Amino acid sequence: MKLQTKITLKKPSKNQISYTSKLLLLGSCFSENIGKKFNYYQFQTHQNPFGILFHPKAIENLITHAINKKKYVPEDLIFQNERWHCFDAHSNLSSANQNELLCNLNATITATNKQLKEATHIIITLGTSWVYRYIETDTIVANCHKIPQKKFLKELLSVDEITESLTTIISLLNLINKEINVLFTLSPVRHLKDGFIENTQSKAHLIAGIHQLLDTAPKNIHYFPSYEIMLDELRDYRFYAEDMVHPNKTAINYIWEKFSETWLCEKSKPIMKEVDAIQKGLAHKPFNKGSEKHQQFLKKIEIKIGTLKKAFSFFEF
């Protein structure tokens, strides 16, 4: 008896992800979930330097500013609720100190420029087509920072606007890194605060915009169906967190397994098993920390870490 529909996944003919790959993940909170998996297995990964970015325009702005090495100045900031914020970045970067925020933004832009030049793969996860335009400057923002909604206009990006933004992203990346592989995916997180119908419309625009791009895109532009796996293979609320909006741990692990099968090269799999064993060993809580048995256990882990670090100097446990 068949109790589940399966998404057909195609492995890329080349340029799969390995331990020599350098990854940059940008986008919605689901990219953070996948980024944590890469970090756990010790891949060379950077993620969301400006924090979570939900829509394509915010990601386009970050890449534009990073490539142009934008220098942030006090006029780029806004003061709200006793903290300084930047409309280009998530509130996680906000600070009570203006100079601290400016230094952080400018250092991050410089680091992102370097990461874009060196990356072999960039994974972009789009979350929503809904954007907010700050009325005072007539600009679309990445985050509203709990500023009163009356100061913004809420807009839905059209399919053509999304395709245009993604096309710009590809063109910008090709300016500084012609070898980079770009992997788009759609976040399975439901933005129900916009409304059920509005969330569906938003996701539909993103899917249509991505595939309109893919119709004419070169071979180094790809799509991974995270959203479709959640919708069609995991069609049950038991795969959602308590908020009924975010995928739960089981769903994230399932989608990661599908991603691993498709995008991670076979040579990396044995190393991942070794890393996993070490991570579980380090997380183990002993009954008696001072026992000889536990000390021997720790020494074995230390030897395993040393062996791996000889082959992969960037590993950090």
Image (cartoon, rainbow, N blue to C red):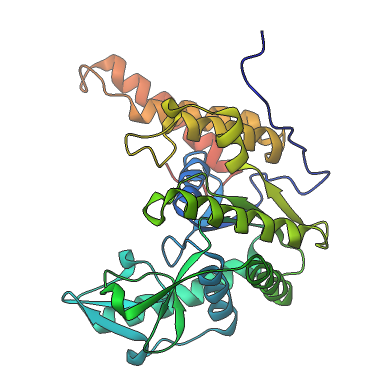
Please state the horizontal and vertical placement of residue 208, each as a whole percent of the image.
Answer: 68, 56
Task: Examine the image and state in which quarter residue 19 appears.
Answer: top right
The answer to whether residue 120 of the structure is visible from this angle is no
The single residue placed furthest to the top in the displayed view is 1
Task: Locate the C terminus and report the quarter of the image it occupies.
Answer: top left
Q: Residue at x 36, y 89 (%)?
A: 136
Nearer to me, 218 or 118: 218
Please state the horizontal and vertical placement of residue 81, each as a whole percent of the image.
Answer: 17, 74
Q: Residue at x 63, y 33 (%)?
A: 258
Task: Judge whether 202 appears above or below 61 on screen.
Answer: above
Task: Judge whether 167 appears above or below 32 on screen.
Answer: below
Q: Residue at x 56, y 53 (%)?
A: 203
Task: Locate the N terminus and report the quarter of the image it occupies.
Answer: top right
Task: Judge whether 51 appears above or below 280 on screen.
Answer: below
Nearer to me, 206 or 312: 206
Decide if residue 11 is on the left or right side of residue 99. Answer: right
Please state the horizontal and vertical placement of residue 176, each as a whole percent of the image.
Answer: 70, 75
Decide if residue 298 is on the left or right side of residue 199. Answer: left
Task: Judge whether 299 appears above or below 157 on screen.
Answer: above
Please state the horizontal and vertical placement of residue 245, each as a whole percent of the image.
Answer: 40, 42
Decide if residue 269 is on the left or right side of residue 13. Answer: left
